[in-house]
Image: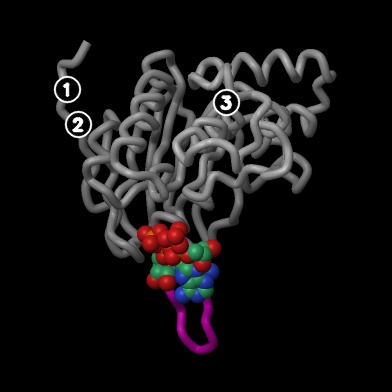
Amino acid sequence: MDIIRTEGIEKFYHLGAETVRAVRGIDLLIQKEEFVAVMGPSGSGKSTFMNVLGCLDTPTAGKYWLNGQQVSELTEDDLARVRNREIGFVFQTFNLLPRVSCLHNVELPLIYAGVPAKERRERAAEKLELVGLGDRMDHKPPEISGGQRQRVAIARALVNEPALLLADEPTGNLDSATSVEVMDIFTTLNRQGQTIVLVTHESDIAEYAKRQVHLRDGVIERDFLNEPTGVA
Ligand code: ADP
Ligand code: ADP
């Protein structure tokens, strides 16, 4: 089944008399359980396209179906629900609340979804254990390392069991050893069946995905499968 289907997605920005054609017609199909890296140089349209896929921005033209629902037909309330329940977001800058515990940070999407307190704590703790942070739940983000913070953000992104995990330059603020740890978590999650779309401009990060979609000047330039690594 497709998780993502786009047809002719365009996004133009008007800056005074000038029009910036950030995305110029993207047709893309991503199936359940895929792990796709969206690659491309700075300015190629990755963030713009990502914002459309994440239902954070509306395209100028084109159609987008997320998990079978046509996004343009959804109301603002439906969109907020889709962003909360169907998509887990991971950002370069973690976006954690610094003054509350890791456990509370991971619980936040469940508060929004109306899940009762006891179940929230259990589900948040389970995801923190999954990313190897069972012993850091009561710490606050400033008390843990950058790699650990990104793992908290991944736990938060997973806590609503989203159909799609969408990560925008998730290793952009991490050193290379820590980046490997974070990418290993994505690899494990994908092996467990999690659909992942990752935006990156780094080719060694894109190698962790099973498929690479390269953008240039707002269109898909190449779309190919990575060689299997052969690692068990
Ligand atoms: P990437 O993420 O690959 O660096 P972007 O999607 O950020 O690419 O940008 C694609 C093009 O669109 C660039 O020329 C950028 O300057 C332009 N752009 C992106 N966002 C905006 C915006 N909000 N207003 C005007 N131009 C924008
Ligand atoms: P990053 O590459 O770190 O994701 P971007 O270059 O995509 O950062 O830009 C960060 C923010 O600024 C985004 O919200 C993007 O839409 C906006 N932006 C990018 N280029 C322009 C531009 N030329 N004019 C206005 N806003 C822009």
Question: Which amino acid lies under the numbered mark 1 shown in the image of this protein?
Answer: Thr
Q: Mark 3 against mark 2, which lies toward the viewer?
A: 3
> Residue 179 bears which disc, if any?
none
Pointer 3 or 1: first along the chain: 3
Reply above or below: 217 against 224.
below
Q: Residues within 10 Å of mark 3 (few under 14, many from 20)?
A: many
Would you name the residue on which mark 1 appears?
A: 229
Does dot 1 land on a helix, a strand or a loop? loop
Could you tell me what secondary structure mostly forms the magenta stretch? strand
Camera-side residue of 5 and 148: 148
Q: Looking at numbered disc 2 in the image, what kind of residue is underneath it?
A: Asn
Near-viewer residue (34 or 92): 92
Residue extent of the magenta highlight: 14-22
The structure residue drawn at horizontal position 46% and vertical position 21%, both measured from the top left corner, is 194
Residue 18 is situated, as x and y percent measured from the top left of the image, at 46, 85
Q: Nearer the viewer, mark 1 or mark 2?
A: 1
Q: Residue tagged by mark 3?
A: 158
The residue furthest top is 232
Q: Alpha carbon of mark 3 to alpha carbon of mark 2: how far?
A: 25 Å
Asked if residue 161 is among those painted magenta in the image, a careful observer would answer no
Q: Which residue is mark 2?
A: 226
How is colour applied across the structure in the image? one colour
